[in-house]
Image (cartoon, grey):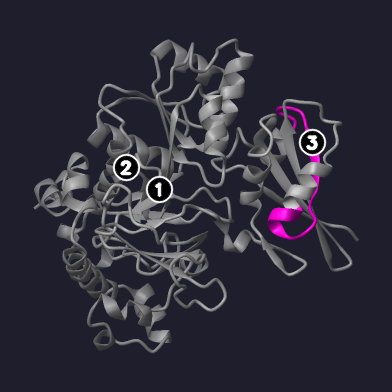
Amino acid sequence: MSQPSYFDAMNYEAMIADYGRPETFVDEIAKMPRDKLRALQNDRFLKLVAFGWKIPFYQRHWGAAGVTPDDIRSIDDIGKLPPYSKEDLMASVEAHPPIGDFHGLDTYAPEDRPPLVFQTTSGTTGRPQPLLFGPRSREIQNLLLARFYALQGIRRDDVMHSVYGHGMVNGGHYVREAILHWTGAQLLTAGTGIETRSANQVNLMKDFGVTAIIGFGDYITYLAGVARKEGLEPGRDINIRVISGHMGAEAREAISKAWGGAEVYDWYGVGDTGAIAGEGPDHAGMYVQEDAQFLEILDVDTGATVPDGESGDMVVTCLYKDDVFPIIRFNTHDVSAFRTDPSPSGFTLRRIVGFQGRSDNMVKLRGINIYPTGLGVILTESDPELLNDYVCIVTRQDGRDEMTVHIETMGDTNRDVSGYKALLKQRLGVEIGVELAGPGELAELTQIEKRQKPIRLITRVVE
């Protein structure tokens, strides 16, 4: 008997029965009664944990914390399981090359083993990490992203331009699959500025009548400036209706204005997990897909659950990843907070405020926690001449750190910056320097054309 194909292992009918289609997300999931949702989470969590106990990584990780299978009776016991991070996965890869022992491929009989979908992370925080998917988890991941595209108004008749990278990185590939398999729109897979030169990208947008751009907000904003250099005016020569992607702390108003008033939507996820939370038409925070993603927000230092409204590390359990690589309490080290106000849309799903920064990329100045990814928006919101490309340079001398934000501007680079410095001190409570640069002058430092995520922090030690 031959081994199952991708399509056999995916089991389309069962997947649709469990997770629905993107266009039914609002009625079937987003408005689900909380008690019904909790019961669904509990069933999927227990199945996931049972699979986890078969896998050496979790046997070792949970056993070291003194946890036994009998300790986990329901999802209410999730706090008994210790979180893990990328460092734990990379230690597994080091000890059990080349893909570690955090997968469940060996739990299948050879004739039943599903195909492995293999990608890696971008490596922005170190050596790239293997990302492993079975056909079922891969296709549900695609479906979850397509839910957000549908919620944000992207349609089959749109022409979409993707600036997500390809190669070994997961982003561009799974975004393409989500659109091809579920959204059905025409897609231009331009990728990063390394894959398709930025000038070529904006001309492709014009030639093919692109109506939606997806990717990282930094580079999307950068492309608007490239378009103007090419003599193309966003909103006139390139009519973008929707922008969806990872806006982070970037000023969405600036992104929208750069593209002629396009509607801008944010969503959050990482390579391991797929789409976790995303905005809808109400722009009132990001809705967590709680039928598939169980999200906790934990104190950065203690690991305890923080009260709603307070910021902490996002720790996620992917309730749908039960075929190859289960993700159970993965600490992303991305910082956010749950919103506490009612949903304007009447959705029952919890919401987060969005990505606030990384706890492992935090700088402590005079005892105050500073997230470099959040500084740009403070400045750009105060002055329309400031651009979204910036980098924070920390100089360390004799045990004391000083930070300067270098940010591009369309105006005079020699003008007085005391107002910007006063604004940062007012908002953050600590003195931070500001230096201005002309358009494109920081590209070598931020590597905005070369990386999925531009560099926002550089540390220099002065001897």
Label 3 vs label 1, nearer the camera: 1
Residue 5 visible in the snapshot:
no
The spot of residue 424 in percent (x, y) is 73, 51
Residue at the spot 47% in from the left edge and 52% down from the top edge: 354
Q: In terms of sequence position, does the residue under pointer 3 or pointer 1 come before the other? A: 1
Give the quarter of the image for residue 177.
Answer: top left
- The residue that label 3 is drawn on is 436
Residue at the spot 25% in from the left edge and 26% down from the top edge: 156
* Mark 2 in CB contact with mark 1 (< 8 angstroms): no
- The residue that label 2 is drawn on is 148
Q: Secondary structure at mark 1?
A: loop
Vertical comparison of 455 with 297: above or below:
above
Mark 2 → mark 3, Cα distance in angstroms? 37 Å
Q: Report the span colored magenta.
A: 425-441
Q: In terms of sequence position, does the residue under pointer 2 or pointer 3 come before the other? A: 2
Quarter containing the C terminus = bottom right
The spot of residue 213 in percent (x, y) is 43, 29
**Amino acid, disc 1:** Ala
The spot of residue 22 in percent (x, y) is 22, 41
- The residue that label 1 is drawn on is 284
435 part of magenta stretch: yes
Label 2 vs label 1, nearer the camera: 1
72 part of magenta stretch: no
Circle number at residue 75: none
Residue at the spot 30% in from the left edge and 32% down from the top edge: 153
Vertical comparison of 84 with 376: above or below:
below
Mark 2 → mark 1, Cα distance in angstroms? 14 Å
Vertical comparison of 242 with 8: above or below:
above
**Amino acid, disc 2:** Phe
Q: Secondary structure at mark 2?
A: helix
Judge the density around disc 2: few (<14), some (14-19), many (≥20) Cα neighbours within 10 Å: many
